């Protein structure tokens, strides 16, 4: 063969070989480095660095998403959500899982889901508005009148749809309704039918407390978590600082510098670490410590402030005078609201402690002398022995009670200095209003017959009967 022809033939062979050799693919379309660079219903495949479809919705009409290549194609094997020639349509009770192109059973009501499709036609996959962190579940739509089946309530989902929800989050046994802790005096102050006013806390708490013992409803997640007993516990429960333990639940603190930064009913108070946070103010004077009242000059931020408007705002041994709690007045050396705060033998009369005339109430005049061995009761004279203090010899009693002279004796059998006191008769406790005295039947004091006596029922009262006011 001519050399020139040979070269031509070889060129033809090489060309034929080149045409039959697989060529590298063209540059991949839609290169990307993140999902934000991709169109709606596409995501960025970080290995191939290109946008891939996630569902048929990403593709143009008549196209389908190939879940394995991420490309929109004219036809796919398996099922499709779009009726078209060459595609399989799922039967009743099934939906097309476009990621696998396989027909799957429709997810039942209140079961976990990831898309509306798997819940079936007319249903939606959504979270409970009260428990957004509990997950998404299949739910039915409310009817045209906004009604639902018995036991379900029509609520707005985050998408704006009206769906039928159960009382708690589907599939979550630890879902709960947290306490709002809104200040209140009656249930109506709570403004929420799920909350009731706790009269001890003066705050709104959940009517139905569903968390098990040892747990509390976390106000951040609306899920049952370990209960707290102090602020330090919240650092462990919530995984960080900035929480306050209230009613055994951890509430996120709202930092502030002044009251105006807090919501209505709260005030800006200092924390132990020097920061300030919003905390509940007061509703009434009863919410404040004794000697202070609820200052409502700023109705949005009522706070406890020193002062009073009535005696009940003060401690029982003080009264309210000119908006200040005072322990005495010009006419009364010791004021009172109740007899127990007065000294032994006194009575609270018109907010003043008035001392009784102890010599006439229980003086020892008129009673027989006690023998050296110790006093014994004299029922005929209503005389009963008073224990005045420990002794081992009578000289110790003389030294302790010189005003009694030889009337006092040391009863060695009980180790007490004793003296007889003449007690007044009574018919009821109102006849013995003095502190430390009670109307006691004579039969209980060792005397037969009927009748009762004003007996000094406290040790200090017995001493007062013997030597006067302590």
Image: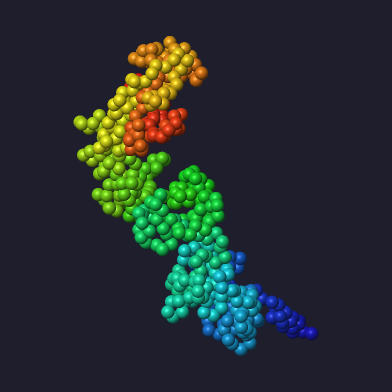
Q: Residue at x 50, y 71 (%)?
A: 151
Q: Residue furthest top?
A: 395
Q: Nearer the viewer, residue 130 or 271?
A: 130
- Which image quarter holds the N terminus? bottom right
Quarter of the image for residue 53 reads bottom right
Q: Nearer the viewer, residue 84 or 357?
A: 357
Q: Nearer the viewer, residue 368 or 344?
A: 368
> How many labels were placed on the picture?
0
Q: Nearer the viewer, residue 29 or 420?
A: 420
Q: Describe residue 99's horizontal placement relative to residue 365 as left or right.
A: right
Q: How is the image coloured?
A: rainbow
Q: Describe residue 66's horizontal placement relative to residue 141 as left or right.
A: right
Q: Residue at x 37, y 43 (%)?
A: 270
338 over 76 or under it: above or below: above
206 over 144 or under it: above or below: above
13 over 229 or under it: above or below: below
Q: Indicate the position of residue 14 as horizontal and vertical percent values.
A: 72, 79
Q: Residue at x 65, y 81 (%)?
A: 78
Q: Residue furthest bottom?
A: 85
Q: Describe residue 103's horizontal placement relative to residue 378 as left or right.
A: right
Q: Residue at x 55, y 59 (%)?
A: 174
Q: Is residue 299 visible?
A: yes
Q: Describe residue 82's horizontal placement relative to residue 453 as left or right.
A: right
Q: Indicate the position of residue 28 as horizontal and vertical percent values.
A: 58, 72
Q: Is residue 75 visible?
A: no
Q: Residue furthest right?
A: 1
């Amino acid at each position: 063969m001519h050399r020139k022809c040979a070269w031509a033939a070889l060129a033809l062979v090489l060309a034929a070989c080149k045409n039959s050799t697989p060529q590298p693919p063209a540059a991949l379309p839609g290169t990307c480095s993140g999902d934000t660079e991709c169109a709606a219903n596409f995501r960025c495949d970080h290995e191939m660095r290109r946008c891939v479809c996630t569902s048929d919705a990403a593709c143009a009409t008549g196209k389908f998403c190939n879940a394995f290549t991420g490309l929109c194609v004219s036809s796919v094997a398996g099922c499709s959500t779009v009726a078209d020639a060459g595609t399989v349509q799922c039967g009743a009770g099934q939906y097309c899982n476009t990621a696998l192109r396989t027909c799957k059973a429709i997810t039942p009501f209140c079961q976990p889901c990831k898309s509306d499709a798997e819940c079936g036609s007319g249903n939606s996959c959504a979270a409970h508005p009260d428990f957004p962190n509990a997950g998404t579940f299949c739910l039915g739509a409310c009817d045209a009148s906004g009604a639902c089946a018995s036991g379900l309530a029509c609520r707005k989902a985050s998408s704006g749809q009206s769906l039928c929800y159960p009382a708690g989050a589907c599939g979550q046994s630890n879902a709960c309704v947290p306490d709002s802790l809104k200040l209140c005096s009656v249930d109506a102050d709570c403004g929420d039918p799920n909350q009731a006013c706790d009269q001890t806390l003066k705050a709104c708490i959940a009517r139905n407390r569903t968390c098990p013992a040892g747990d509390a409803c976390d106000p951040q997640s609306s899920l049952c978590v370990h209960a707290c007993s102090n602020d330090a516990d919240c650092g462990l429960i919530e995984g960080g600082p900035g929480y306050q333990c209230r009613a055994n639940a951890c509430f996120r603190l709202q930092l502030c510098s002044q009251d105006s930064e807090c919501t209505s009913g709260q005030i800006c108070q200092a924390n132990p670490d020097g920061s300030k946070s919003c905390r509940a103010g007061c509703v009434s004077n009863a919410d404040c410590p004794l000697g202070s009242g609820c200052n409502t000059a700023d109705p949005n931020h009522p706070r406890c402030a020193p002062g009073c408007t009535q005696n009940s705002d003060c401690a029982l041994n003080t009264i309210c005078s000119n908006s200040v709690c005072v322990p005495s007045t010009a006419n009364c050396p010791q004021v009172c609201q109740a007899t127990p705060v007065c000294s032994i033998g006194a009575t609270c009369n018109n907010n003043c402690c008035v001392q009784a005339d102890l010599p006439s109430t229980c003086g020892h005049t008129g009673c027989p002398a006690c023998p050296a061995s110790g006093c014994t009761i004299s029922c005929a004279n209503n005389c009963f022995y008073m224990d005045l203090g420990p002794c081992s010899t009578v000289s110790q009693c003389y030294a302790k009670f010189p005003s009694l002279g030889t009337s006092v004796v040391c009863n060695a059998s009980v180790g007490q200095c004793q003296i007889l006191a003449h007690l007044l008769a009574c018919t009821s406790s109102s006849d013995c209003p003095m502190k430390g005295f009670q109307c006691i039947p004579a039969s209980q004091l060792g005397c037969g017959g009927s009748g009762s006596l004003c007996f000094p029922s406290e040790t200090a009262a017995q001493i007062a009967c013997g030597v006067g006011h302590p």
